[in-house]
């Protein structure tokens, strides 16, 4: 018997905006995440069972980052939501670079033609590779693209579509956006203008599911049977976030479906106004190409209230595994409760959560005059149902081989709901078992694990902070940085009095760019090392005996004890490091300057 147990999120720390695909040639799932200012960027992970993920590559190395102008982006700029697909036998990632500071780029030696190419594409680009491991070529700037969150979709007739979101040109309310599409040539990466359907300027296909719907974004097109489905996020990546599904009957391809729609409204004498000259719109008052799932949203946590620790769920992508069936990945945000009523704070950024998905039809139409059982078209997949029987992102998932017998009170399945469909594996989903033992507090050794750079700041390396209750040791005689953005960070220095810096501990709390410097003097007697405990919206600066188990000492300190070999030097409100207080889209990182000595006496390179 093979049992796979999965705990959400599947990757911890700042791995936002997931996009994934079934890589049939290699029998694995491949997932990419956005990375904003981080270099290397666009991390790619693979898995064959959804439970174990391997980091196989980063699509953006330092050379690619320079070509993408990442050294010159502002805070919470850089690499926004990507889409990963196979197109024409090659791996393709399409994405957006946002918030480029053009003056900084010019000072950095960027040629005007480079800036012009990025500007004409509004930062939208494609990169391609023959293998997920790379090398990745590009970027290919998409001249004429407009907006963010691009999708790339290859249809059954070979046509390839570039689809993304932009602010609505004539919004009915603040925050309204519109989804547009246009065919693209994946050899030259130019938008097609051949005068035919979806090839004659941008074509708007969606503006949101309901009245006051804001930030319809993160679009993805999928062919499922005779239909093309459009999935979009909606509500903005905040507490109203959600995922919607729409579709159009397109057995001969999306292009043919658009042609049929246009012929139909022309015959009826209907004219749908174009957003601007040279564009088209397939979304009228009474006529539209895509029709919505009446059960939308198909995924959200906005109905669970503020006591739910996982918020902002949405921005989904789906795939079909030949054994494990249909699945959705979406971002979510683990929140920490604040002291004030309704206060929720996030420190980790957005993370990827997964759930099984099924396809269903309504068993009847519930009309007043009845009508008997509905007639089902065998080519109609129905509508997606995410986490059936649970109605939310599961906290844990168990996957068993088909036909496996397991006792209902087994901890692997206790209290869980079975997913009922024709997938060959047995999948159960649920919330965390009340009897589950809490995991040990993680310790992040940034001196060992840091391998990320922000933009081109070569003097420091960072690691993602993966939990909101975590211990962060300061390198012996070195410096630790806890960073939210360039104006919200903590810099903790431990001097040994060895000539490099005076003996003692100094901490700089930087909030809104203003420094609050605190000096604590030499370490207390019996203590040789320094650490920061990040827990429950508080930063605790600790001195401890480096020969002892720091995790055990900290646990005893939290319980109110004063163990030998551990002393609290300071406590500070951590909320200024949260996304809610600092603004932006990223999570906290722990960094160490390159060249800082680490505990085993070696030096970081």
Image: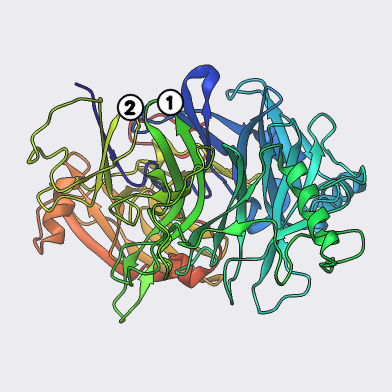
Q: Is residue 458 among what the camera can see?
A: no
Specify few, some or many for label 1: CA neighbours under 10 Å numbering under 14, 14-19, or 20 or more.
few
Please report the residue visible at 32 percent of the width from the left and 61 percent of the height from the top. 521
CA separation, marks 1 and 2? 8 Å
How is the structure coloured here?
Answer: rainbow
Q: Is residue 325 visible?
A: yes
Q: Is residue 441 above or below residue 277?
A: above
Report x, y in % for residue 584.
Answer: 56, 64
Q: Nearer the viewer, residue 77 or 384?
A: 384
Q: Which mark is residue 391?
A: none
Decide if residue 152 is on the left or right side of residue 366: right
Q: Nearer the viewer, residue 231 or 498?
A: 231
Residue at 19 percent of width and 21 percent of height: 1
Q: What element does badge 2 sit on?
A: loop
The residue at the point 13 percent across, 44 percent down is 414
Q: As rendered, which of 365 and 138 lies closer to the eye?
A: 365
In the rendered image of this protein, does residue 44 appear above or below residue 103?
Answer: above
Where residue 52 appears, as percent x and y from the top left, is: 35, 30
Q: Which residue is mark 2?
A: 424
Q: Residue at x 45, y 61 (%)?
A: 295
- Characterize the local packing of mark 2: few (<14), some (14-19) or many (20 or more) Cα atoms within 10 angstroms: some
Could you say where residue 11 lies in the image, as x and y percent from the top left? 40, 42
- Pick whichever of labels 1 and 2 is earlier in the sequence: 1
Residue 547 location, quadrant: top left
**Residue that numbered label 1 is attached to:** 322
Disc 1 + disc 2, Cβ < 8 Å? yes
């Amino acid at each position: 018997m093979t049992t796979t147990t999965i705990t959400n999120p599947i990757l911890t720390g700042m791995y936002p905006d997931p996009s994934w695909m079934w890589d049939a040639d290699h029998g694995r799932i491949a997932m990419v995440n956005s990375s904003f200012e981080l270099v290397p960027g666009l991390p790619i992970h693979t898995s064959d069972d959804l439970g174990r993920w391997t980091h196989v590559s980063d699509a953006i190395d330092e050379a690619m980052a320079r070509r993408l102008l990442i050294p010159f982006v502002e805070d919470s700029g850089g690499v926004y939501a990507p889409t990963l697909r196979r197109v024409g036998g090659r791996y393709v990632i399409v994405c957006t670079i946002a918030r480029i500071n053009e003056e900084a780029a010019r000072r950095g030696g960027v040629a005007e033609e480079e800036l012009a190419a990025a500007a004409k594409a509004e930062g939208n680009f494609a990169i391609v590779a023959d293998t997920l491991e790379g090398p990745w070529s590009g970027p290919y700037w998409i001249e004429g693209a407009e907006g963010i969150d691009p999708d790339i979709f290859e249809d059954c007739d070979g046509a390839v579509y570039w689809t993304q979101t932009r602010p609505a040109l004539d919004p009915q309310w603040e925050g309204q956006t519109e989804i547009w599409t246009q065919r693209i040539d994946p050899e030259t990466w130019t938008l097609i203008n051949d005068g035919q359907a979806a090839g004659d300027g941008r074509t708007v296909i969606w503006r949101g599911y309901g009245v006051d719907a804001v930030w319809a974004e993160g679009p993805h097109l999928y062919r499922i049977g005779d239909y093309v489905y459009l999935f979009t996020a909606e509500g903005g990546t905040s507490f109203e976030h959600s995922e919607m599904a729409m579709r159009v009957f397109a057995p001969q391809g999306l292009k043919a479906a658009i042609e049929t729609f246009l012929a139909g409204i022309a015959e009826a004498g209907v004219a749908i106004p174009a957003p601007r000259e040279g564009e088209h719109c397939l979304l009228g008052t009474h006529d539209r190409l895509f029709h919505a799932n009446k059960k939308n949203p198909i995924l959200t946590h906005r109905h669970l209230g503020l006591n739910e620790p996982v918020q902002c769920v949405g921005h989904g992508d789906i795939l079909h595994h030949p054994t494990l069936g249909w699945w959705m990945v979406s971002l979510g945000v683990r929140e920490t409760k604040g002291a004030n009523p309704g206060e929720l704070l996030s420190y980790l950024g957005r993370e990827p959560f997964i759930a099984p998905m099924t396809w269903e039809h309504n068993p009847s139409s519930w009309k007043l005059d009845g009508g008997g059982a509905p007639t089902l078209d065998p080519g109609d997949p129905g509508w997606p149902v995410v986490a059936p029987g649970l109605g939310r992102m599961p906290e844990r998932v168990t996957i068993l081989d088909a036909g496996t017998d397991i006792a209902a009170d087994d901890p692997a399945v206790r209290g869980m709901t079975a997913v009922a469909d024709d997938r060959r594996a047995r999948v159960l989903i649920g919330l965390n078992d009340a009897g589950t033992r809490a995991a040990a507090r993680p310790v992040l050794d940034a001196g060992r694990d840091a391998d990320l750079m922000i933009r081109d700041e070569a003097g420091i390396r960072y690691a993602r902070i993966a939990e909101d209750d975590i211990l962060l040791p300061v390198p012996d005689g070195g410096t630790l940085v806890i960073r939210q953005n360039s104006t919200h960070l903590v810099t903790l220095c431990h001097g040994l009095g060895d000539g490099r810096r005076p003996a003692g501990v100094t901490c700089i709390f930087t909030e809104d760019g203003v420094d609050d410097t605190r000096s604590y003097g030499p370490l207390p007697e019996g203590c040789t090392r320094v650490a920061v405990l990040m827990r429950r919206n508080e930063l605790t600066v600790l001195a401890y005996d480096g020969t002892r188990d720091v995790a055990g000492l900290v646990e005893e300190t939290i319980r109110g004890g004063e163990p030998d070999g551990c002393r609290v030097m300071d406590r500070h409100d951590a909320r200024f490091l949260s996304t809610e207080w600092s603004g932006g889209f990223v999570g906290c990182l722990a960094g160490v300057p390159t060249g800082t000595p680490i505990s085993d006496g070696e030096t970081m390179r």
